[in-house]
Image (spheres, rainbow, N blue to C red):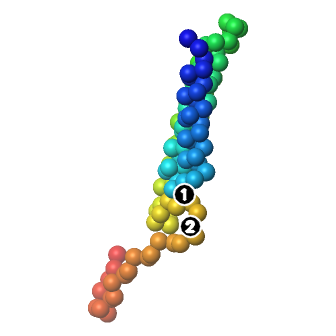
Amino acid sequence: MSPALPLLLAAFLAGIGTYGVLARRHAVLMLIGIELLLAAAGLILVTVGQFSPDPHASGAVLTLFVITIAAAEIVVALAVIMAMFRTRGEVDLTGEAQPAAPEEQPANSGAGTVTR
């Protein structure tokens, strides 16, 4: 089997991932683009390791590191996105930072009521 097909697939994934990162404003869609880029890198590492004449060159081991880093990156990025959504009410990365509308407090009609 020729390494052209996996490398072509990796180039296709990298192209879609790059488009997703550069053209999207939504934070979750940008994360999907980054994950596609990391998947392309992992596919390239496995392909080069498979077709390398050196028996000690293992792309699969490096791919495991890429997968581990991608999982940690997703956890941190989703936590940041959730915090941003809670404060701004949206996850648009190019919009102006507008704080979420404060909740309206009911007017205190009774003078002797105690709030806890």
Given the current orientation, which residue lies at the most extreme right position? Answer: 54
Dot 1, crowdedness within 10 Å: few (<14), some or many (≥20)? some
Q: Is residue 88 left or right of residue 45?
A: left
Residue 66 visible in image? no
Residue at the disc numbered 1: 25
Among numbered discs 1 and 2, the one appearing first in the sequence? 1
Q: Nearer the viewer, residue 64 or 33?
A: 33
- Looking at the picture, does residue 78 appear above or below residue 2? below
- Looking at the picture, does residue 51 appear above or below residue 79? above
Residue 63: mark: none
Q: Quadrant of the C terminus?
A: bottom left
Query: Residue 46, image x and y in percent?
Result: 59, 20
Q: Residue shown at 64%/12% (left/top)?
A: 51
Residue 86 visible in image? yes
Q: Nearer the viewer, residue 15 or 87?
A: 15
Instruction: Kindly check if marks 1 and 2 are in contact, taking CB atoms under 8 A apart as contact.
Output: yes
Label 2 SS: loop
Q: Residue shown at 47%/63% (left/top)?
A: 90
> Real-space Cα distance between discs 1 and 2?
9 Å
User: Which amino acid type is marked by label 1?
Assistant: Arg
Query: Residue 50, image x and y in percent?
Result: 61, 13
Q: Is residue 62 left or right of residue 115?
A: right
Label 1 SS: loop
Q: Residue shown at 51%/56% (left/top)?
A: 26
Number of numbered discs on residues: 2
Residue 95: mark: 2
